[in-house]
Image: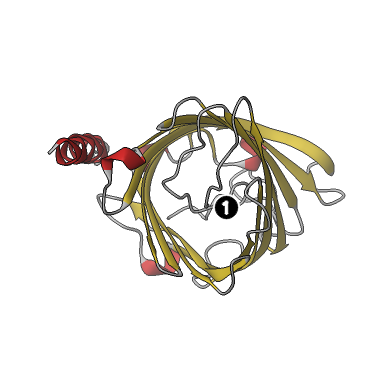
Amino acid sequence: MVKYTHCLVFGSVLLTTTLSVLSPPAQAQDNYEIQVYSSEATPKNVTMVEIHSNFTVDGSKQVINGVLPTNHAMHETLEITQGWTDWFETGFYVFSSIQPGGSGGGGWNWVGDHIRPRFTAPESWHLPVGLSLAQEIGYQRRKFAEDSWNYELRPIIDKKLGRWYFAFNPAFDRALHGLNTGRGWEFSPNVKVGFDFTKKITGGFEYYGALGPVSNFDPISQQSQQIFPRIDLNLSPNWEFNFGAGVDVSNSADHLIIKCIIGRRFSWGRKSGAAQK
């Protein structure tokens, strides 16, 4: 009876919070941190350090709305996530961009910082699916983004079925300061499907969409629809490796991006378990 009470409480909080944000042209997938989250939180006393390296093979080639071109830009993001309890973690991001020579002065540029607290339904609740809720807020320099401050609410639902893995992140984001503040809350659904070919190799795809304001989606021609075939290597419980190449099928975002995530878990006082992302 207790586990069902927990499920109802968590579900009510998740539903209430999600509905509260549904109040009064779609942006492309953020190409600094391209990831579909799993519901599993970083365990207590464990620190996860990740490097996200994303290279835009074919992107924008001129300044648009004051934002520098992305073509041939390398985006490097440092993500540090600390597990405080088995149901709560905090992530911190440092975004940077290596611009091609002549683009905004070229070289390595600091872009901005984000913070992401996340709550996860504990395994002791024995829910039929994994559930968690992340919030992310942060700043980015104006020449790298149309909006200098953003907020995101991201429910996370996932399920492991034999050798198959499914994750759904229906994200709601809002510009707090910048060109898109008048657009209100926007809907960006993200999906991950994986299959364990072996104990160490998982393949599949990730989908990233940006459909526009929840009250009135953008025309399909202005929406962003990106598909990333990807591979995960499960070489060690303490290491994470993800590689993918994404194509925008709607021609409204960067057309071709190559991404790589390398992560390392550090345990402080106890051994860390394997975490799937």
Task: Tell me residue 147's x, y (percent).
Answer: 52, 37
Name the side, left or right, on which 131 lies relative to 3: right
Dividing the image into 4 quarters, which one contains the N terminus? top left
Name the side, left or right, on which 250 lies relative to 23: right
Vertical arrangement, residue 162 with respect to residue 131, above or below: below
Q: Secondary structure at mark 1?
A: loop
Task: Tell me residue 27's x, y (percent).
Answer: 48, 52
Label 1: which residue? 34
Vertical arrangement, residue 7 with respect to residue 211, above or below: above
Task: Tell me residue 109's x, y (percent).
Answer: 77, 37
Q: In the displayed orientation, state which residue is furthest to the left.
A: 1
For residue 160, say whether it is visible.
yes
In the rendered view, how is the structure colored? secondary structure
| Of residues 215 and 81, the one drawn nearer to the viewer in this rendering | 81
Name the side, left or right, on which 132 lies relative to 146: left
Task: Tell me residue 74's x, y (percent).
Answer: 75, 51
For residue 247, say whether it is visible.
no
Residue at image location 46% in from the left, 39% down from the top: 41
Q: Residues within 10 Å of mark 1 (few under 14, many from 20)?
A: many
Name the side, left or right, on which 189 lies relative to 90: left
| Of residues 17 and 148, the one drawn nearer to the viewer in this rendering | 17
Vertical arrangement, residue 268 with respect to residue 129, above or below: above
| Of residues 243 and 96, the one drawn nearer to the viewer in this rendering | 243
Residue at image location 59% in from the left, 30% down from the top: 270
Amino acid beneath label 1 = Ile
Vertical arrangement, residue 21 with respect to residue 210, above or below: above
Residue at image location 22% in from the left, 34% down from the top: 13
Residue at image location 45% in from the left, 27% down from the top: 85
Q: In the displayed orientation, state which residue is furthest to the front.
A: 270
